[in-house]
Image (cartoon, rainbow, N blue to C red):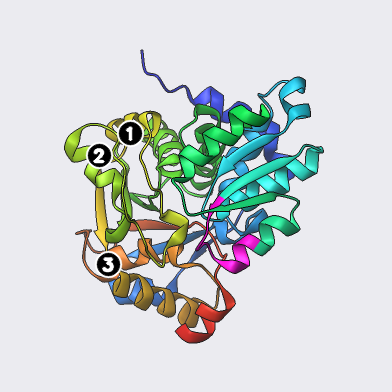
Amino acid sequence: MSFFDINNVLIAKNKIHNKINNTPVIKSFFFSKLLNYNLYLKLESFQKTGSFKVRGVLNKLNYISDIEKNNGVISLSAGNHAQALAWASNEIGIKSKIIMPFNASKSKIKSTKYYGGNVVLTKKNMLDECMEIMKKENLTLIHPFDDDHVIYGQGTIGLEIFEYSKKFEYVIVGVGGGGLISGISAVLKTLNPKIKIIGVEPINSNVISKSLISNKPESLSSNTTIADGLAAPFAGNITLKYIKKFVDRIVCVNESEIKNSLREVIINEKIIIEPASAVTIASLVYKKIQIPKNSNVLCLMCGSNIDSKFLKELL
């Protein structure tokens, strides 16, 4: 019997649908012509707080007790999960504390505070700092990715993709800690076992690739990348299990490939995305994946939280 049951994602959809955006899918005429595919973009960049993260957070918050809600929640994040947790917690009236790296994007720190999160910046190991404060203050951890309920929430994207079209042959997803690709891949492989799911990591933050090689969750001592939305410092036991079962391949892209692809998406598609979103396009433009001509391909645009200074320099 499989550890994954799609009914849990259907339940998640029912619980969170009225609080999230059913984000659009658009055909990219520019990249379709450039790559000789029918290329579509799933715009989670238009999601509440500017990323997919609210789906998993909202679903997880449905499963903590009233006592836990009263005490408050805690997590660790470079920015997108931080904003999602702050916003979702504020929506239901509970306190949130988020451990963020001292060099996190200033705009993401500012937004997290704006949404009501209590931000703690640290130069220490974020997980160690988070666990220490969690125990000291009796808070409940809302994990950024390694949690079944979070994964079920992210899996609602897979349902939306399948509802849009049953003809997709390849779905390309950015990979950080793996919660996003775990949920999407489990749903789509359940509904269509023939579909190919490809994950894309920044080469500077390739903790999942390393974990697949060693067959155990690895950690990174350094993972600085412009795709900070994918800069997970460690892998998880749960997400690694999902990825090994449902994901066909993980590839890596470098910093210049991400940056160049980000610029091309913004200029040619007229949409604002963050570098973490651009890794999926980069994997195709720079031939990390061999896909037959005229295939039906979907790239996930996971977020739009780009720093304004970086955006100005990029363009």
Q: Secondary structure at mark 3?
A: loop
Rendered location of residue 76, percent (x, y)? 54, 44
Residue 264, placed above or below residue 81: below
Which numbered dot is residue 211? 2
Rendered location of residue 288, percent (x, y)? 21, 62
| The N terminus lies in quadrant | top left
Q: Secondary structure at mark 2?
A: helix
Report, in whole angstroms, how far the alpha carbon at label 3 lies from the one at label 1.
Answer: 22 Å
Does label 2 or label 3 sit earlier along the sequence?
2
Q: Would residue 269 appear left or right of 284 to someone viewing this image? A: right
Question: For the point 58% across and 39% down, which residue is it?
Answer: 56
- For the residue pair 107 and 288, the one nearer the viewer reads as 107
Query: Does residue 5 appear in the picture of this structure?
Result: yes
How crowded is the residue under tag 2: few (<14 C-alpha within 10 Å), some, or many (20+)?
A: some
Q: Would residue 47 appear left or right of 152 to someone viewing this image? A: right
Q: Secondary structure at mark 1?
A: helix
Residue identified by numbered label 3: 254
- For the residue pair 24 and 248, the one nearer the viewer reads as 248
Which numbered dot is residue 33? none
Residue identified by numbered label 1: 240
Rendered location of residue 45, percent (x, y)? 57, 61
Look at the numbered discs 1 and 2 and tell me whether their residues touch, using CB distance below 8 Å.
Answer: yes
Report, in whole angstroms, how far the alpha carbon at label 2 lies from the one at label 3.
Answer: 19 Å
Does label 1 or label 2 sit earlier along the sequence?
2
How crowded is the residue under tag 1: few (<14 C-alpha within 10 Å), some, or many (20+)?
A: many
**Magenta-tinted stretch:** 100-109
Residue 69, placed above or below residue 82: above
